[in-house]
Image: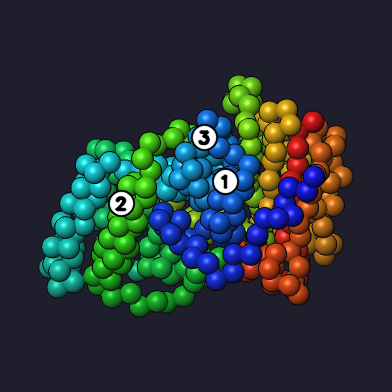
C-alpha cells in the first residue's frame, strides 16, 4: 500500500510562521506543515516521536500541538535552546515576567538613546570588537545581564531566544548564512528597540501557543550526538520525523557562533561533531565516504530506537562533495537494509513541478530533496 500517495506536500504560499515557528532563523528549517501532516496521518496521542536532528524544534512544536510526546536531539546547543523554548508553553506568570522586562527596557531604552547611560561591563570573547560595534556590545551586555537576573528558567530561556534572534542583525555579520563582516552603522538605541519589537511579537505568539496547548505533553531535548543514542537506554519510539544536515551546504556552528558567545553556549562541541558540515567537506580533502559513514551510524541508531514496524520519515537533500553529486535517496536505499530498515517509499522534489519541493531555497541549486519513508524490520 502506498502511504504517501494521497498526501499533499505542496506548501507553497502557506503561512510557515504561525505560533512559535517564526521565533528564530535556522537554515533548512522544515515548513511546519510537513511534520504536521505526517504526525496527523501517522501518529496520535499516547505515542512518542523522535527527531534526532531536531534543529529549531519544528517537529517538537507540531507534536506538542497534536498532544504527542516527543524527544529531540541536536549537536548544536542553540538548536536545543530553540527547541525547548518553542515547544513548551509558558504559564501566565512566566509570560508576565517577560512582559515586565520589556516594560523596564522601554524606560531604559530612552536613556540609552539619549546617551545618558553607558556603564555596563561587556563580556570578553575573541572577535568581539571585529564583529560588534562598541555601542551595540554595550546594549547587548545590558540586555544579557537583565535576562540572566531572572530566576525562572523557562522565562529566562524565552528571553534568551529573543536576544539570540537579534544578534546577527545588530552584529557586523552579513547575514545568517554569510559569515563576512560588513559595516552596518547601527545607531545608539537600535539594539534595544529591536529587542523590544521582537520580544513583544514573540510574547504574543507564545501566548497564543500556550493557550492552544491545553494539556502539555512531555518534550525532552538532548544536546548530544545522534551517532550514539545509547543514552536513551533502549527506549523505543513509535515514529521518527527528521531531516539530517544537507551535506556540504551549511555550517550550523559557524552561523550561530556569536549568538552562542552572548548566550554562554559552547561552540566547539558542535564545531567538531556536526556531521556533513561545509567546514568538513568544502575543501577537497574529505571524500564522500566520510559523510556516508557518519550518516549510516545515525541510521543504525535510528533503527535501534524504533519500535518494530515503526516508521521513519526522512527529509534529505542531495550533496555535492569533491565535485561528485551524491543522490541521497540512492545512498540511503543502499545501506538501509543492512541496518534493519526497509525503504518503503520515496517522494523526490521535481524542479520543473514546484509542487514537491520541501525547502525551495535549497532545491534551486540544482539538487533534489527527498522525502523517504522507511520501516523498522
Ligand atoms: C536540516 S537541520 C534540521 C532542521 C529542523 N528540521 C528544523 O525544522 O529546524 C539539521 C540539524 O542536524 C544537526 N546535527 C548535525 N550533526 C549532528 C549530530 N552529529 N548529532 C545530532 N544533530 C546533528 C544540526 O545541528 C542541525 O540542527
What residue is disc 2 on?
207
Work out whether mark 3 precedes mark 1 in sequence or the reverse, and give the earlier one. Answer: 1
What residue is disc 1 on?
40
Residue 173 lies, in percent from the top left, at: 47, 68
The quadrant holding residue 156 is top left
Label 1, ligand 1: CB separation under 8 Å: no
Residue 212 lies, in percent from the top left, at: 37, 47
151 versus 274 height, above or below: above
244 versus 177 height, above or below: above
Foreground mark, 3 or 2?
3
191 or 284: which is nearer to us?
191
At 68% from the left edge and 52% from the top edge, which residue is drawn? 315
> In the displayed structure, does residue 263 sit left or right of residue 196?
right
- Whole-number angstrom distance, CA of label 2 to CA of label 1: 23 Å
What residue is disc 3 on?
45
> In the displayed structure, does residue 227 sit left or right of residue 57?
right
**Badge 3: how crowded within 10 Å, few (<14), some, or many (20+)?**
few
Amino acid at each position: 500500500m502506498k502511504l504517501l500517495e494521497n498526501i499533499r506536500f505542496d506548501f507553497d504560499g502557506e503561512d510557515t510562521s504561525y505560533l512559535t515557528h517564526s521565533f528564530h532563523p535556522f537554515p533548512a528549517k522544515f515548513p511546519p506543515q510537513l511534520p504536521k501532516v505526517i504526525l496527523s496521518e501517522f501518529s496520535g496521542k499516547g505515542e512518542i516521536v523522535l527527531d534526532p536532528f531536531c534543529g529549531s524544534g519544528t517537529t517538537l512544536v507540531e507534536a506538542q500541538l497534536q498532544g504527542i510526546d516527543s524527544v529531540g536531539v541536536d549537536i548544536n546547543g542553540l538548536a536545543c535552546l530553540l527547541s525547548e523554548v518553542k515547544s513548551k508553553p509558558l504559564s501566565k506568570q512566566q509570560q508576565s515576567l517577560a512582559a515586565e522586562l520589556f516594560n523596564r527596557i522601554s524606560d531604559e531604552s530612552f536613556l540609552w538613546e539619549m546617551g545618558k547611560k553607558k556603564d555596563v561591563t561587556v563580556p570578553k570573547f575573541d572577535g568581539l570588537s571585529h564583529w560588534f560595534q562598541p555601542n551595540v556590545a554595550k546594549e547587548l551586555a545590558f540586555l544579557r545581564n537583565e535576562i540572566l537576573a531572572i530566576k525562572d528558567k523557562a522565562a529566562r530561556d524565552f528571553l534568551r531566544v529573543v536576544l539570540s534572534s537579534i544578534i546577527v542583525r545588530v552584529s557586523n555579520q552579513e547575514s545568517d548564512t554569510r559569515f563576512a563582516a560588513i559595516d552596518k552603522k547601527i545607531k545608539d538605541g537600535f539594539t534595544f528597540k529591536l529587542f523590544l519589537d521582537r520580544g513583544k511579537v514573540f510574547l504574543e505568539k507564545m501566548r497564543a501557543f500556550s493557550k492552544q496547548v491545553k494539556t502539555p505533553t512531555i518534550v525532552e531535548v538532548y544536546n548530544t550526538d545522534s551517532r550514539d543514542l545509547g543514552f536513551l537506554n533502549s527506549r523505543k519510539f513509535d515514529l521518527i520525523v527528521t531531516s539530517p544536515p544537507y551535506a556540504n551546504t551549511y555550517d550550523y556552528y559557524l552561523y550561530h557562533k556569536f549568538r552562542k558567545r552572548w548566550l554562554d553556549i559552547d561552540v566547539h562541541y558542535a564545531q567538531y561533531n556536526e556531521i556533513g558540515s561545509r567546514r568538513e567537506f568544502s575543501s577537497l580533502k574529505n571524500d564522500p565516504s566520510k559523510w556516508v559513514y557518519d550518516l549510516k551510524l545515525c541510521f543504525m541508531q535510528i533503527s535501534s530506537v524504533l519500535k518494530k514496524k515503526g516508521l521513519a520519515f526522512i527529509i534529505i537533500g542531495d550533496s555535492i562533495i569533491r565535485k561528485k553529486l551524491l543522490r541521497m535517496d540512492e545512498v540511503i536505499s543502499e545501506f538501509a537494509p543492512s541496518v534493519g530498515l526497509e525503504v518503503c517509499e520515496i517522494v523526490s522534489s521535481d524542479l520543473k513541478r514546484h509542487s514537491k519541493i520541501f525547502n525551495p531555497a535549497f532545491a534551486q541549486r540544482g539538487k533534489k530533496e527527498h522525502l523517504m519513508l522507511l520501516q523498522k524490520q
